[in-house]
Amino acid sequence: MTDALASLPPVPETLVIGGESIDISPLKVGELPAFARAVLPIASKLGTDPDWLRLLSEDGDSVIAALAIACRRPSEWVSDLDLDEAIRLAEAVFMVNADFFVHRVAPEIVRASQTIGAARLGLTSSSDSSDSAIATPTS
């Protein structure tokens, strides 16, 4: 049952922010580089209960850039939000993406790592056996 649910596409979280209905869905691969660059300065300050006001006051440009990428709106749109709306948006963006990474991406990374590891072990064991067949000079 869990495997069947994991194969379903993620359901976006819909919020009304800035007078608009916004669907927050997990980031796409093409969005990750820009999002990662935007989040990098604040990554160490994120946790289970981030201080959004502090983040906005100390690293506002990074927060705004990350939110704009994740909600697929221009930075100016995010900049014009009221503080309470920006905080709700930030919480939704990070919750949707954290959930997606924990439940869908991380298991795929583990699966791929195991597959690659198993393939490497297969290569290693076959090359090890061929190495022992190579004649070595004796003195």
Image (cartoon, rainbow, N blue to C red):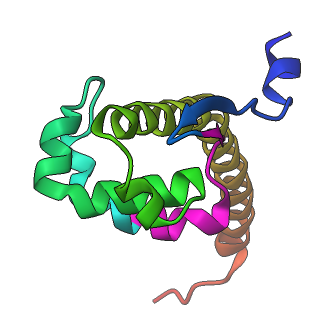
Front residue (pair 121, 75): 75
Which residue is at a point 50% across and 42% down the rendered structure image?
18
Q: What x and y, as percent, mark residue 81?
A: 38, 47
Which residue is at a point 68% across and 41% down the rendered structure image?
108
Q: What x and y, as percent, mark residue 20?
A: 61, 42
Q: What x and y, as percent, mark residue 86?
A: 37, 40
Front residue (pair 119, 82): 82
Q: Is residue 67 magenta?
A: no
Which residue is at a point 70% across and 69% down the rendered structure image?
127
Front residue (pair 38, 128): 38
In the rendered view, would you say 75 is above or below 45?
below
Q: What x and y, as percent, mark residue 76?
A: 42, 65
Q: Residue furthest front?
A: 19
In the rendered view, would you say 78 is above or below 8?
below
In the rendered view, would you say 95 is above or below 127?
above
In the rendered view, would you say 115 is above or below 69?
above
**Magenta residues, start to end:** 20-36
